[in-house]
């Protein structure tokens, strides 16, 4: 069976797991004609955005959203960008005028067959309904694709000109319109409303707030951005020089009061803005060299950061304190992710390993060995339901995935007995490591020497329990950069800006055009697991 | 030339390391293979120190027996004692000596930088051994423990097997591999040690140097035509073989086998594969009891092959000196950001505009430094 959009014939369009077969549903990409010369220098990241249902209302409400807090600031920024009221007109025009061809909303997705021209033409849909969108960066542009449409091409393209957007995130709970957060290679940061972009036919970001303009506060590359959970508009931007900044989107972004120079580059330090008006409101100096990724724990209490120096650092965000952390086996760490319950942090990096850090045990509890190159993204599967235990006596508690520069997607199961038992057994041998806290006087003395925040050195190879992947599959022809689990699928993206959507077992493709066909095939597969398994491992 | 020198000085400003010299090397017609390796070796601090030391000793004793060692130590001394901080030097005498010594390098053809590195290190070893045996009493001189009879399997370890003296070249570059063969009939494990001055690694598309090292040490089954003669069974038997690092070297030189003989084509082809290499590395393929198996290495030089084929192209080198990365292209020296190193990993596609690929990597052990 030929995949609809297979970019390389050598990449198989399905892979098998204990729970069944994952199948390539469709792909998202960008028009190659738009490729910028700087294309090779950026790495594509993917953000998933769920726009919640918002019934079509009068223009004024649909644009400025419900909250009043940020409105004034936003429009002032819009004026700075030279779009001001003009763009406002365009927004409404877009919202109402172009609702003809496609009807927005996830359930009634229509297939657009042409698919050649992108974003330049009038926008096809009214984006006042709910929908799921993929946001990804390539070269100097951000592309937005409708996740539920089979159409390969994006529905929106935003060009940034001088600098390239390289990191972005989306806040589904944003109270006012600004839910999209974008960091650039120049250090510049923007927040904007995704819905507003989708309603506008232009190719520029509109109605945006602009922070760290022209790198006034920090001119090094942005490396990662994150909304502070439950904070009503605070967000964090990390940079390639080891600093991260906390901003308040409800404040004007123009206050460029400089922070004092970092005294000791090797030490963690926090500096607060001297004026209550200035934005960013705080700077954290985290490490020497780049911070590569940051991630908040689901409850917002902790912030994890990984970087060039190979350390995972976990901070208690509100207290601005380093809580714990550890070093990679060797080389930089490139990515990190929290488990849905906030108990574990995954890291991946230049040692080709996926490390599992336990917040409870304050140590690395497992090494995932299986990648043949650097690990570029890790994620827990929050929708994974452990199969009922008893059959094998083994209770699987977590499922996570990783993608690497070896073009592979790996899936892992983290079982309680794997984590707990080897550790207890290994306890004795770990005593040589300063990381290991032994009960008694020694521990007390040791703790009195150490500050609250403790960074563990690199683990010794023999002492860490190893995990093997339950599945390894080459999903793209190019090195991978992004991984997202959704309820229905797994999303993978490669450096070059191709995104693939892999349907979970039992999930049918959402395209009406393919549905009849694929439903047939998938039901057959379910009946003959042995056969499909054979073909899977042939080659 | 002069302008590039001052540009470099300007770029470094007051961060210019004291006593350090950054000099380009003149190209005498396709001698970039030589220049790129020389720069990497010049910034291999223990190696440079030995050569400077050697030069000062021969100056005192006055015996100027002209050989590759004296020519190299003279060249390094010349660079090191320049009044200016930057500039260009013509390694004329050294190149002449190389050409005199080895006809392979005599032509103006494009040469292989790795072959040159091999030739140079082995030549230095020979000279040092001759010096040692000549100067010392006949019975003295350290006898090297692992004298080997057999050549290396697959020719993968570029060892030097006949020496009996441990020279400073050995102390810097030499490591030991152990080749374990397990007879599948009697389960007897035969271990055979061999030394190496660098490791040649097979490469794969979209892989890491760690993965290449793992493959280097992966278990191989000897069967069919390629059975193993088991001394215990006194017959040819199926066996499993693997090669692990028993003693890691102080300076780890890794050669990526980018030039591969393609039988169907009847010629060599350059593999432009993307092979990522971290700035810090630990060896994953050491024996369990190897001393220093958890030792961390730090990348300090990369010899880069530029070009799409094996018979033409260019060599440049990247060098880390006092926490700055420098780019050496014959006469030219530039300062580069650490992040530029990753543009030399290779290409994910066979035909790409990027033809600058890391070819020889030099890592320094951080543990044996102090």
Image (spheres, rainbow, N blue to C red):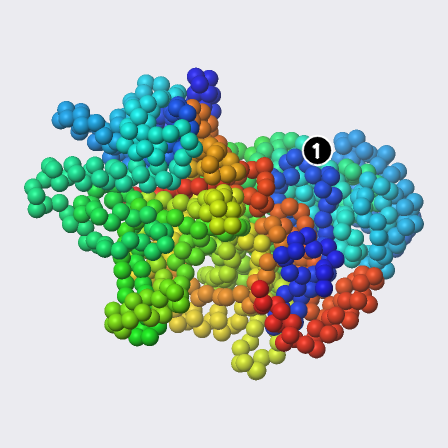
Q: Kindly tell me whether residue A338 is visible in this rendering.
A: no
Q: Residue at image x 87%, y 39%?
A: A90
Whole-percent x and y of residue A299? Answer: 62, 59
* Depth check, front residue: A366 or A108: A108
Above or below, A247 relative to A384: above
Give the residue at mark 1.
A161
Describe residue B238's horizontal placement relative to residue A504 as left or right. Answer: left
* Label 1 SS: loop
Which chain is indicated by disc 1? Answer: A
Quadrant of residue A257 in the image?
top right
Describe residue B338's horizontal placement relative to residue A192 as left or right. Answer: left
Circle 1: is it few (<14), some (14-19), or many (20+) Cα within 10 Å? Answer: few
Above or below, B79 relative to A57: above
Whole-percent x and y of residue B227? Answer: 35, 66
* Depth check, front residue: B45 or B270: B270
Above or below, B125 relative to A534: above
* Depth check, front residue: A430 or A10: A10
Whole-percent x and y of residue A437? Answer: 39, 63
Quadrant showing the C terminus of chain A? bottom right
Quadrant showing the N terminus of chain A? bottom right
Describe residue A235's horizontal placement relative to residue A193 as left or right. Answer: left
Quadrant of residue A502 in the image?
bottom right
Whole-percent x and y of residue B282? Answer: 39, 52
Q: Kindly tell me whether residue B107 is visible in this rendering.
A: yes
Q: Residue at image x 52%, y 72%?
A: A416
Q: Residue at image x 84%, y 58%?
A: A109
The number of callouts visible is 1
């Amino acid at each position: 069976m030929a995949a609809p959009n297979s970019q390389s014939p050598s990449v198989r369009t399905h892979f098998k797991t204990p729970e069944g077969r994952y199948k390539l549903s469709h792909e998202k990409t960008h028009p190659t004609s738009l490729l910028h010369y700087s294309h090779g220098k950026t790495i594509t990241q993917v953000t998933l955005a769920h726009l919640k249902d918002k019934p079509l209302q009068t223009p004024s409400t649909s644009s400025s959203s419900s909250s009043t807090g940020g409105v004034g600031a936003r429009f002032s920024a819009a004026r700075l960008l030279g779009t001001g009221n003009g763009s406002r007109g365009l927004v409404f025009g877009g919202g109402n005028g172009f609702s003809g061809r496609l009807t927005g909303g996830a359930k009634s997705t229509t297939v657009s067959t042409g698919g050649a021209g992108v974003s330049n033409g009038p926008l096809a849909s009214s984006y006042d309904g709910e929908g799921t969108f993929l946001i990804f960066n390539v070269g100097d542009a951000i592309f937005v694709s409708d996740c539920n449409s089979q159409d390969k091409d994006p529905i929106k393209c935003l060009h940034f000109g001088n600098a390239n957007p390289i990191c972005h995130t989306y806040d589904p709970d944003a109270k006012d319109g600004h839910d999209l957060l974008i960091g650039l290679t120049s250090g510049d940061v923007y927040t904007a409303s995704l819905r507003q972009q989708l309603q506008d036919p232009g190719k520029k970001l509109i109605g945006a707030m602009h922070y760290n303009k022209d790198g006034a506060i920090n001119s090094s590359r942005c490396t990662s951005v994150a909304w502070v959970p439950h904070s009503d508009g605070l967000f964090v931007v990390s940079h390639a020089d080891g600093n991260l900044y906390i901003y308040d989107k409800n404040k004007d972004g123009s206050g460029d009061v400089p922070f004092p120079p970092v005294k000791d580059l090797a030490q963690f330090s926090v500096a607060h803005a001297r004026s209550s008006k200035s934005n960013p409101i705080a700077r954290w100096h985290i490490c020497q060299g780049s911070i590569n990724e940051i991630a908040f724990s689901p409850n917002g209490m902790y912030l994890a950061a990984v970087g060039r120096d190979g350390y995972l650092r976990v901070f208690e965000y509100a207290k601005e304190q380093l809580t714990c952390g550890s070093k990679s086996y060797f080389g930089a760490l490139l990515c990190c992710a929290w488990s849905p319950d906030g108990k574990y942090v995954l890291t991946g990096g230049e040692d080709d390993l996926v490390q599992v850090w336990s917040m409870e045990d304050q140590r690395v509890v497992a090494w995932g060995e299986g990648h043949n190159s650097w690990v570029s993204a890790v994620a827990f599967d929050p929708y994974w339901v452990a199969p009922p235990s008893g059959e094998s006596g083994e209770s699987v508690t977590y499922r996570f995935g990783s993608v690497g520069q070896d073009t592979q997607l790996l899936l892992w199961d983290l079982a309680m007995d794997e984590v707990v038992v080897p550790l207890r057994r290994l306890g004795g041998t770990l005593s040589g490591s300063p990381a290991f806290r032994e009960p008694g006087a020694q521990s007390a003395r040791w703790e009195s020497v150490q500050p609250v925040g403790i960074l563990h050195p690199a683990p010794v190879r023999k002492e860490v329990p190893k995990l093997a992947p339950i599945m390894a599959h080459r999903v793209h022809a190019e090195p991978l950069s992004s991984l997202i689990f959704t309820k229905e699928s797994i999303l993978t993206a490669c450096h070059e800006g191709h995104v693939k959507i892999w349907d979970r077992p039992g999930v049918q493709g959402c395209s009406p055009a393919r549905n009849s066909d694929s439903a047939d095939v998938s039901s057959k597969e379910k009946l003959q697991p042995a056969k499909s398994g054979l073909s899977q491992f042939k080659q | 030339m002069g302008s590039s020198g001052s540009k470099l000085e300007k770029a470094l400003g007051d961060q210019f390391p004291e006593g350090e010299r950054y000099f380009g090397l003149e190209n005498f017609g396709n001698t970039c293979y030589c220049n790129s390796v020389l720069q990497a070796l010049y910034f291999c601090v223990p190696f440079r120190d030995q050569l400077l030391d050697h030069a000062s000793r021969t100056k005192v004793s006055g015996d100027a027996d002209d050989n590759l060692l004296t020519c190299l130590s003279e060249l390094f001394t010349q660079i090191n004692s320049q009044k200016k901080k930057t500039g260009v030097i013509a390694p004329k005498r050294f190149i002449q000596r190389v050409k005199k010594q080895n006809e392979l390098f005599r032509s103006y053809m494009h040469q292989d930088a790795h072959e040159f590195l091999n030739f140079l290190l082995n030549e230095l070893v020979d000279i040092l051994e001759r010096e040692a045996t000549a100067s010392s009493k006949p019975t003295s001189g350290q006898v090297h423990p692992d004298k080997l009879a057999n050549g290396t399997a697959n020719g993968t370890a570029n060892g030097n097997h006949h020496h009996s003296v441990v020279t400073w070249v050995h102390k810097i570059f030499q490591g030991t591999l152990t080749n374990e063969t397990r007879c599948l009939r009697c389960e007897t494990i035969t271990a055979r040690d061999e030394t190496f001055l660098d490791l040649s690694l097979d490469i794969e598309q979209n892989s890491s140097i760690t993965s290449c090292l793992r493959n280097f040490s992966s278990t191989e089954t000897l069967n069919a035509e390629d059975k193993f003669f088991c001394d215990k069974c006194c017959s040819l038997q199926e066996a499993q073989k693997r090669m692990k690092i028993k003693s890691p070297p102080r300076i780890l030189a890794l050669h990526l086998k980018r030039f591969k003989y393609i039988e169907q084509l009847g010629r060599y082809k350059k593999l432009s594969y993307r092979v990522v290499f971290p700035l810090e590395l630990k060896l994953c393929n050491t024996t369990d009891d190897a001393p220093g198996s958890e030792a961390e290495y730090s990348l300090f030089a990369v010899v880069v092959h530029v070009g799409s084929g094996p018979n033409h192209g260019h060599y440049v080198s990247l060098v880390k000196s006092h926490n700055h990365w420098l780019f050496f292209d014959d006469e030219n020296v530039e300062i580069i950001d650490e992040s530029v190193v990753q543009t030399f990993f290779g290409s994910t596609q066979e035909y790409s505009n990027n033809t600058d690929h890391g070819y020889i990597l030099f890592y320094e052990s951080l543990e044996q430094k102090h």
